[in-house]
Amino acid sequence: MNLNQKGVRALFNKRALTPFEIMKYLHLAFAFLTISGFVLRGIWMLRGSSLSRHPLTRTVPHVIDALFLGTGIALVLQLQLAVLQNDWLLAKFAGLVIYIVLGAIALRHGKTMHARRLAFAGAVCAFFYIVGAAVSKSPLSWLA
């Protein structure tokens, strides 16, 4: 066992992470990157910054979001969850659709700045609803 493996094991109670734990931590990291990137792009949009039109700003979020979705699907498969039988999971997917639609309105398709602001706030709320549903394992999200 090399020094790096010893360091990682010491950080996590002297045991190696399971494949599920690795996927879960990757999913959480991509969740953080996704919402951080969205908020940053929203701020740039609200300020009229040219950074919101930079080529990397238009491609990197799609890569991060794809990895976020991919790790979520991998977790569902690893846990062998029946999606249609878990209300909280269905609620997360519904929240995801709302987040995507509102995010698209906020960052691209909103016809007025007022519509974009409202969609931006709604998308952030939808994201935190999804987090609440995941944490509580309830479609009531943070109210459970």
Image (cartoon, rainbow, N blue to C red):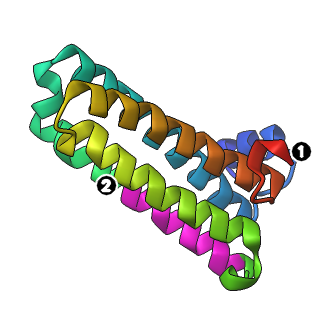
The x, y position of residue 6, in whole percent, is 75, 44
The x, y position of residue 1, in whole percent, is 72, 54
- Left or right of 75 in this view: 49: left
C-alpha span from label 1 to label 2? 32 Å
Is 72 or 119 nearer to us in this picture?
Answer: 119
- The magenta span reads 65-78
Q: Secondary structure at mark 2?
A: helix
Which mark is nearer the camera, 1 or 2?
2
Q: Residue at x 19, y 45 (%)?
A: 109
Callout 1 amino acid = Asn
Q: Residue at x 22, y 39 (%)?
A: 110
Task: Answer with the quarter of the image where residue 88 lies.
Answer: bottom right
- Are circles 1 and 2 on residues that touch, CB within 8 Å? no
The x, y position of residue 127, in whole percent, is 55, 44
Name the residue beneath numbered marker 2. 63
Name the residue beneath numbered marker 1. 13
Residue 135 seen by the camera: yes
Callout 2 amino acid = Val
Residue 108 among those drawn in magenta = no
Q: Secondary structure at mark 1?
A: loop
- Left or right of 119 in this view: 90: right
